[in-house]
Image (spheres, helix red, strand yellow):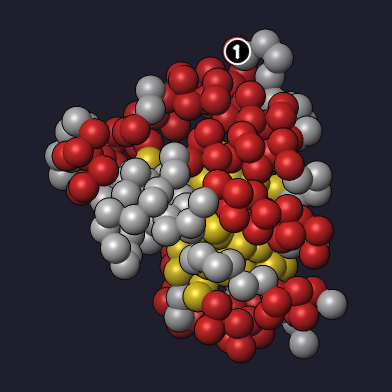
Amino acid sequence: MTIPRLAVQLHPQATSVAELLAAARHADEIGVDSIWTWDHFYPLYGDPDAAHFECYTLLAAIAAQTTDAKIGALVTCNTYRNPNLLADMACTIDHISGGRFILGIGSGWFERDYTEYGYEFGTAPGRLALLKQSLPVIIDRLAKLTPGPVNGKLPILIGGSGEKVTLKLVAQFADSFNTFGPPENFAHKNQVVTNWCNEIGRDPKEVERTVGIAADDLDNLEAYAEAGADVAIVMLGSPFDLDPIEKLLG
């Protein structure tokens, strides 16, 4: 059976830092492709006031306690940090990890984060416009930093599904993109990215394709591979059951 490479997203809610780091170490040991968390300030489901931990400080800790898996945010909210600062933070974590960091980024959507932390929520088109402005700034700052990224270039992943703007930004700026299932939806979005690449004159093969799936969607891995997924990122909440992934990794 042909399946995508397997990765995990560890939800930093209703858990502890110790549990998150133990899960990250375990995921690294069993050979996942990459380890992700999300960039929010409050839980996205369940108890809205449960424990929750900040993304980039957590990623730095994961970087220090793992050795092989790539790491990143699925995805960073562009407007939570100045783009120059974000580039510097990403590059520093890249060095902590020995060159395993991926800068996952998107335009943002969770209104509670904005209102409670004093950011302007604005509109979806406005947030996308800000993402379009920030991406060249981030890339430019990464090129100016001393030292720069460990491997010379820091990979950028853009997450989202908007076909007119977001997926065009993928073709213009990203090394990979992430969206969600089911397989039919992923196949369609995947083709839109390919079409944008062709329109702007970029080789579509330069863009890695990743899909976020629930743990109970592991039976559909072959369908996701057929839809063009290079990596399937299994989204997990506490208690972070990695056994099904470990079995698939053999």
Seen at 58% across and 40% down, the residue is: 59
For label 1, count other residues whose C-alpha is less than 10 Å away and answer few (under 14), some (14-19) or many (20+): few
**In the shown orientation, is residue 74 left or right of residue 8?**
left
| Residue that appears at 21% across and 47% down | 112
- The quadrant where residue 62 appears: top right
Quarter holding the C terminus is: bottom right
Residue found 61% across the figure and 18% down from its top: 143
**Horizontal side of residue 44 vs 142, given as left or right:** left
Where residue 137 sits: x, y (%)?
Answer: 45, 22
Is residue 123 placed above or below 57 in the rendered structure? below
Q: Quadrant of the N terminus?
A: bottom right
Residue flagged by tag 1: what amino acid is it? Lys
The answer to which of 99 and 8 lies nearer the viewer is 8
Give the total of numbered labels.
Answer: 1
Residue 29 position by quadrant = bottom right
Helix or strand or loop: what does disc 1 sit on?
helix
- Tag 1 residue: 144
Instruction: Tell me if residue 147 can be seen.
Output: yes
* Residue 108 against residue 167 in the figure, above or below: above
Tell me residue 248's x, y (percent): 76, 79
Residue at (46% x, 75% y) in the render: 181
Is residue 170 in view? Answer: no
Position in image of residue 33 (x %, y %): 73, 59
Most foreground residue, 22 or 36: 22
Rendering coords of residue 82 (x, y %): 38, 23
Residue extending furthest right? 250
Q: Nearer the viewer, residue 117 or 73?
A: 117
